[in-house]
Structure formats: C-alpha cells, structure tokens
Amino acid sequence: MKYLDLFWAMDLLYRYYPKYHSNELLLLADDILKWINNELPEDSSTLIYLRSYFDSPYDALSKVWNEVLLLAGPFSRFN
C-alpha cells in the first residue's frame, strides 16, 4: 500500500507543485522508485549513492514516504 500512496503523491506533486524538479526530496523519491523498479544500471552513481545511505529500497521508501505525503497534503484537497 505504501508504494501506491507514494506513487499517487508523486504524481500529484508532479502535476501541481511548481518546484517539483528542484526539490531534492522529490528527486530522491524518484530515484528510490527507479531503484525499486530496477531501472537503475548496476554501475550508476545514483544506485551507489542510495546503497550507501539505505540498506534496501524498502528502507529508503519508508524513510522518504511520510515526508512526501506531508508535502503533497495541501495539494490533495482543493477548496
């Protein structure tokens, strides 16, 4: 369920958050999703960086998930 929630929040922020491509947290979340989907080559510097900070893709997902949902919260319910 967490993966779908993160994917939903990332999609929502991509559409409505004006600084999406300059936010480091969102770039990190994008890289984690690529890591989960095995879209990063083994010799990628991004993969080496992620492995140096996180034990697994799911550990990384759990640490970034709440922060992304907090950022997406205001965009999920428009008045």
Image (cartoon, helix red, strand yellow):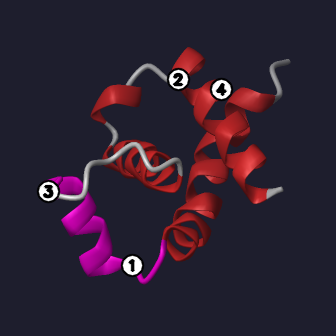
User: Image point 22% across, 55% down: which residue?
Assistant: 46
- Judging by the rendered image, the residue that carries numbered circle 4 is 12
Instruction: Check whether the beta carbons of the residues at disc 2 and disc 3 lie within 8 A of each other.
Output: no
- Mark 1 or 2, closer to the camera: 1
Which sits earlier in the primary sequence, circle 1 or circle 3? 3
Q: Position of residue 39 (x, y in %)?
A: 40, 43
- For the residues marked 1 and 2, what is the alpha-carbon distance in whole angstroms? 24 Å
34 lies left or right of 75: left
- For the residues marked 4 and 1, what is the alpha-carbon distance in whole angstroms? 25 Å
Which residue extends farthest bottom? 55
Which sits earlier in the primary sequence, circle 3 or circle 4? 4
Q: Secondary structure at mark 2?
A: helix
Q: Position of residue 59 (x, y in %)?
A: 54, 76
Which sits earlier in the primary sequence, circle 2 or circle 3? 2
Which residue extends farthest front? 42
Which sits earlier in the primary sequence, circle 4 or circle 1? 4
Numbered badge on residue 45: 3
- Judging by the rendered image, the residue that carries numbered circle 2 is 14
Looking at this view, is 8 or 73 the one in front?
8
Q: Which residues are magenta?
A: 44-56
**What is the crowding at mark 3: few (fewer than 14 residues within 10 Å), some, or many (at least 20)?**
few
16 lies left or right of 30: right
User: Image point 45% across, 50% down: which residue?
Assistant: 38
- For the residues marked 2 and 3, what is the alpha-carbon distance in whole angstroms? 24 Å
**What is the crowding at mark 1: few (fewer than 14 residues within 10 Å), some, or many (at least 20)?**
few
Relative to 62, say whether 23 is above or below.
Answer: above
29 lies left or right of 63: left
Relative to 21, say whether 41 is above or below.
Answer: below
Q: Position of residue 53 (x, y in %)?
A: 31, 78
Instruction: Check whether the beta carbons of the residues at disc 2 and disc 4 lie within 8 A of each other.
Output: yes
